[in-house]
Amino acid sequence: MMDPDDLAIGIIAGLLEARTGQRLTDDRRWRIAPALSGLFRERGIASNQDLVVLLTQPDESSLAQDVVEALLNNETYFFRDRSVFDYIGETLLPRLASERAKSKKLTIWSVGCSSGQETLSLAMMFAEQGKRWDGWEIEILGTDVSSSVLEFARAATYSNFQIQRGLGVAQMLAYFTETEDGWKAQYRLRDRVRYEVHNLLHPAPFPGRFDLILCRNVLLYFDKPVRERAFARLSEALADGGRLVLGGGETVLGRSGWFVPDVERQAVYKHGPLAGQGSPHASAA
Ligand SMILES: C[S@@+](CC[C@H](N)C(=O)[O-])C[C@H]1O[C@@H](n2cnc3c(N)ncnc32)[C@H](O)[C@@H]1O
C-alpha cells in the first residue's frame, strides 16, 4: 500500500501541475517541505495529509492558490544571462525599431516575470538607449500566474541582496532610490511597465500584438504536451515579424512547429510553419 505521506505529496504536486503546468517530478518533490513550511506555520497545519484534508473544505478555496504560489520557483535577477540582454539591446531592438518606424510603437511581453527584475531590466535598456526612442510608445507588460510575486513587482522595491544581483553600482544608483524598505525603482522605469496576473496556458492576453516576447525559465518543467500548448499561446500572441526569447537552458525546447530559431545561440525564435493555425484545444491546466 502507498505511504499516506507519499499519497499526500502526490496530490499536492498534482495541484501545482493542474494549475500551472509546472511538474514536480519525483526527484524534485523534496522541495515541497521547505516551500510549504511557512504556510504550515501560519495556518497551524501539521502535515501534508492535514493539508490535503483542508484543501477539500469548501471554505478553504484560497488555500489552494496559496499552496501553488508557495511551490512555484520564482528565482530571477536583473539582466539574467547578460549576453541575451546585450543581444536584445544591440541587435533585436534596433531591428524592431526600423521595422516599426512608421507606427513608432513597440509592445513587449515578459511571461513569468516573477518579481519584476526582467521587466525592469528591459525598461533600463530603453532608458540607456535614450534618444533613439524619443516619440515612441513603448509598453512592457509583465505577467505571472502568481499574484504574490506581482504584488512585489508592482512595489518595485528590492533588498540589498536582490539589487546587487545583476546590477552594477552605477545602474543601481542611476535607476533606484534607497528607501526604508529597500531600493525602489524610479518612476521613469515603473512608468514603462505594467503587470497582470495571467496563466500562460490560458488564451493570450492580446493576440498578435507583441513585437517581442520573453518567456524565460518558465517552460523548463512543463511536460511535452503542456509545452506545445504554451508555444501555441505564445505564437498566438506574437505579432508578424516579432521575436520570442527563451531562457538559456531552454534553447532546444524552442524548436517546434510553432517557432523556428532566429538566433539559436541566444534562444531567439520567430514564427514557424504552424503560426496562425490556432491552439490545440485542451482546457488550461
Ligand atoms: C524561474 S521564474 C523566471 C523569472 C524570469 N522570467 C527569469 O527568467 O528570471 C519562473 C516564473 O514563471 C511563473 N510561472 C510558472 N508557471 C507559469 C504559468 N503557467 N503561467 C505564467 N507564469 C508561470 C512562476 O510563478 C515564476 O515567477
Image (cartoon, rainbow, N blue to C red):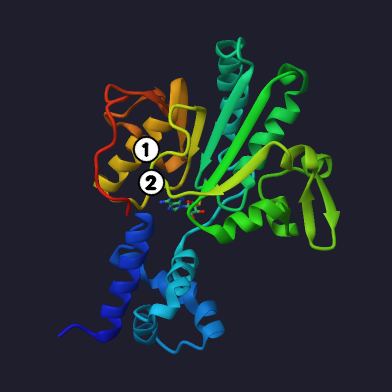
- Judged from the image, the secondary structure of the residue bearing numbered disc 1 is helix
Viewer-nearest residue: 216 or 53: 53
- Is 249 situated left or right of 79 in this image? left
Classify mark 2: helix, strand or loop: loop
Tell me which numbered mark, 2 or 1, is placed earlier along the sequence: 2
Mark 1, other Cα within 10 Å: few <14 / some 14–19 / many ≥20: many
Q: Is residue 163 above or below residue 249?
A: below
| Image quarter of the N terminus | bottom left
The residue under label 1 is 233
Residue at x 35%, y 72% (from the top left corner): 12
Q: Which residue is mark 2?
A: 202
Left or right of residue 6: residue 209: right
| Mark 2 Cβ and ligand 1 under 8 Å apart | no
- Exactly how many numbered labels are in the figure? 2
Q: Is residue 249 above or below residue 60?
A: above
Query: Residue 262, image x and y in percent?
Result: 41, 21
> Are dots 2 and 1 in contact, CB under 8 Å?
yes
Specify the amino acid type for callout 2. Answer: His
The part of the image, by quadrant, that contains residue 91 is top right
Instruction: Kindly identify the residue that appears in the image at 30 percent across and 66 percent down.
Output: 14
The type of residue carrying mark 1 is Arg
Q: Residue 195, percent across and down?
A: 60, 46
